Amino acid sequence: MKMLVAGEKVGGKELPVVFPYDGSVVDVVPDASDEDIERALSKAVEGATVMKKTPSWKRAEILEKTAKLIMSNLEKLTDLLVLEVGKTKREARSEVIRTAELFKMCAEEARRIHGETLPFDSLKGSESKRGYFVREPAGVVVAITPFNVPLALCAHKVGPAIAAGNAVIVKPATKTPLSTIVLGELLLEAGMPPEALSVITGSGSRVGMKLVKDPRVRVVSFTGSVSTGETIAKEAGLKKLCMELGSNTPMIVCESADITKAVKATVSGGFSIAGQVCISVQRVYVHKKIFDEFLSMLKISVESLKVGDPRDESTDMGPVIDEANAGRIEEWLNEAVRKGAKLVTGGERTGTLIQPTVLAQVPKGTFIMTEELFGPAVAVNEFESLEEAIHEANSTKYGLQAAIFTNNLQEAFKAIEELQFGGVIVNETARYRADFMPYGGYKMSGLGREGVRFAIEEMTEIKCIVVETGK
């Protein structure tokens, strides 16, 4: 499959895209040359001028048409996601539908970008002045997307960038670029000015960093690891940065909680996409009076999951992205057991397939308790007081989302006020995300916010206008 450079299909030195389940090659994509990158950047500058002059109704029309085209290609995109990511058919189909809905949201918000009047007469001596501010496109946006949700997370960057009137260059994850290239083709079919859109494939360290460093780029929107985010922050220069850098997501289950609902939320939040989600449930703190009951119910639910070939409609969980990550996840689980954790269920690995795993009474200093696992396992520990649970939940360098299950209003609001996370979810899995809500984290979980309207704000500049009326 060829990449898109300023709307044109371009080939080059080939990089394989591999099916995580069995290692077979799905397709190949180009490894972008320096000339390809330069052309994308220089044309994007032209494209930014074109996009700024494109009225909001036209930008909305492009986004609406893209949503319709995505749904027209539902099965094609679903199959691509299954093959390049290894997610199940149901997960992949859900992502495609979500992506179409995201573009609809972006179309709506494209019509609602506005400023405010400013009360200059509130300042003594400025009674004769009138003014307001408006939001204008930032210019060239570089969107760097991860492997786990390549289509929807691309939409979270590209859709708002277009809605705001920017040109955009997408650098998809090297392991999962196929669906993103197809999305780029659909955007062009929907009427996106070709000079304003590129989908560049190749390594993040070379291709991605060349884009990040270039002074013609005004906004970098990145989803990925903390280490890469720190490198981008050091190398980008004076640019607007919006970065979602992952987490180690906690969930608190109080004595008053609906245990059945909490168990269901742990399973859906911990094992969807084989746990490869930034807000996957990873640490679960359960009140000691319901700990044994919760753990018993969780074990039964987890062991009912069907693990295997993601192309099978009946499969509940597929593989992780590659052997290297599978080996790392296995070692982290083994490390926890060596240090005293109880293996409740799972823990076995066959290639890239890891059995859904539950660990209990996990020591604090282990990898699963301190780092982002990005794999199908949850650690379940008990607590006596809510203060203790909140303290443990906060004892991380991350702060993306957290959840609490309780039927006690005071407990709920105590957690809402004291949890140090960008999102606090009550009586629902911490993995919950509505695509219009502000999404981002505290501490090392990132900078800025995604969510359509909030991403548009990140991708626009404020211009202030002051008029002396002479009155």
Image (cartoon, grey):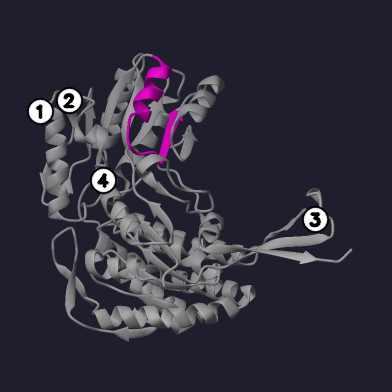
Drawn side of residue 103 relative to residue 201, left or right: right
Evaluate if marks 4 and 1 touch, with contact meaning CB atoms under 8 Å apart: no
Evaluate if marks 4 and 3 touch, with contact meaning CB atoms under 8 Å apart: no
Quarter of the image for residue 114 reads bottom right
The three-letter amino acid code for the residue at tag 2 is Ala
Q: Residue 374 carries which label?
A: 4
Drawn side of residue 276 relative to residue 453, left or right: left
Determine the secondary structure under disc 1: helix
Drawn side of residue 3 relative to residue 390, left or right: left
- Give the residue at x 55% y 67%: 164
Which residues lie in the magenta part?
385-404
The three-letter amino acid code for the residue at tag 4 is Phe
Q: Which mark is residue 341?
A: 2
Determine the secondary structure under disc 4: loop
What distance separates the C-alpha of mark 4 from that of mark 3?
Answer: 56 Å
* Residue position for label 1: 338
- Give the residue at x 35% y 39%: 398
